[in-house]
Image (cartoon, helix red, strand yellow):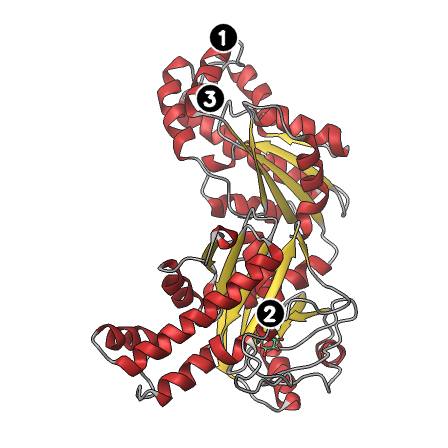
Amino acid sequence: MRALGIDIGGTNIRAGVVTPDGTLSSLTRQPGSRDPEAVLTQVVALVERLGPVDAIGVGIPGRVDARTGAVMSGGYVDLSRLDFAARLAAATGLPVAVENDATMALIAEARLGAARGCENVVLLTLGTGIGGAVQDGGQIVRGRASAGQLGHIALDPAGPPCPCGRRGCFETLASGSALRARLDEAGLPSGIGFAEARNRATAGDKAIAAVIEAWVEALRAGIDSLIASFDPDCVVLGGGLGAEAAEVLAGTRGRSGWFDTSIRPAMFGDDAGVIGAGLAALSRLKPRRRAVLVNGVPASGKTRLADLCARLTGWPVLGLDTVKDPFLAAIGTIDRPFNRRLGVASLGAMADLVARWPDGATVILDAWFGFQPLDVIRVHLDKAGIDQLIEVWAHAAPETIGARYAARTASRPVGHPGLEYVPELVDLARRARPTGLAPVLEIDTEAEPDLVALSRFLSGGWAR
Ligand code: BGC
């Protein structure tokens, strides 16, 4: 399945094709418009140009009613006068998901990016305005309809006017366009970017230094208020100026320990909104098949975890070794390359089996997925018709994994490498990581598993 993710920004419209693992292709950027009808026409043309796709997701710069998809207000571009989602669906014949633009960026960053693994997140996009979105306990905070308008917390009631009707909102003081306007006033020639402005400030340009200092102060003040309000695991900064803001803030501290929270740049940078829009659109389509990848190196404890997942959910387990071991037993002792070929064939058999299951099925796949390049794994998942994934990552101290493997060599089915493999396995365990294809729950198999956390992940991890 593929969706078109679209991010309607103040200055540009960005669009790209997104697959369920967050891969973005055909990214296109074009100047936007302040005329809502013109924006709709542009979006329809983008769908025609970049399609075919199965669904469309659009990040809107304004308040969006999360339950109905109605656009309630806008800033620089105001789409509230159009029945945007319905008109786009009618023009393209495709399902359309709309959300606020920063909410889309949060979906991408929380699922697969800088906030992956964090339950509680504040995200800001710093661009033409300041977009905001909050995740609390793994759920996006919605309020009655459209919570998260973090660009509109007031920092200075006597400050510059804001499109929301007030004065001195966060975005009037700290957005990309606010910073640009102040730098212009300080004499920075247009076309010169932020990096050069910082160089000039360091080289002694006092006017520019004062503008940057005021910007950092406003950012810090706004972010500290958000940390005090939401107590997040991390604050993610995205949009055109997110990376720069995270960098300048790295040199600052909150006023006290109250405000000590990790502030980090968005992993997908300014593309987060497009990726999140695509993911949001895909998650509304009924998945064909879902899989829980229970992944980990040999002897990491993944098979016990896979069985535990099956007990907690009733979903069937398909293990790579379950497919491979009878062949090993029939063939007898084999060398490592042949063992690997059997592994690849077993992966193919697993995909072919699942491909024949009814739509709507969920399967637990128990394997060390790192034994093949990610692209090969993707091809097999695709062949199996699996379009929604979560991953449980089994790990333990590398020495424990080595000791477990050594202890089991006598009882392992014929064909598996013997004791000589242990040093290599210990080294592999040191380097191995989850696939990165899906939301992940990491489980230390040396401790008793937290059944509540595991059950919660197996039921709710999909939506993130
Ligand atoms: C709007 C927000 C939007 C942000 C970023 C603000 O002016 O009020 O809804 O998320 O700009 O586009």
Question: In the image, what residue type sits under mark 3?
Answer: Ile
As drawn, the label of residue 150 is 2
Query: Which residue was labeled with disc 1?
Result: 410
The foreground one among 77 and 433 is 77
Mark identifier at residue 401: 3
Can residue 94 be seen from the camera position used here?
A: yes
Q: Are marks 2 and 3 in contact (CB under 8 Å)?
A: no
Q: Position of residue 440 (x, y in %)?
A: 58, 43
From mark 3 to mark 1, how far is it between C-alphas?
16 Å
Rounded to the nearest angstrom, the CA distance separating label 2 from label 3 is 46 Å
The picture places residue 73, in percent across and down from the top left corner, at 69, 81
Residue drawn 58% across and 75% down? 154
SS class, disc 2: helix
- Nearest the viewer among 18 and 456 is 456
Relative vertical location of residue 37 with respect to residue 295 in this rendering, above or below: below
Query: Ligand 1 lies in which image quarter?
Result: bottom right
Select label 2 or label 1 by which is in front.
2
Q: CA distance from mark 2 to mark 1?
A: 60 Å
Q: Are marks 3 and 1 in contact (CB under 8 Å)?
A: no
Amino acid type, label 1 = Ala
**Closest to the observer: 147 or 314?**
147
Looking at the image, tell me whether mark 3 or mark 1 is earlier in sequence order. 3
Residue 406 at x, y percent in the picture: 45, 13
Secondary structure under tag 1 reads loop
Q: As drawn, is 202 to the left or to the right of 83?
A: left
Element at label 3: helix
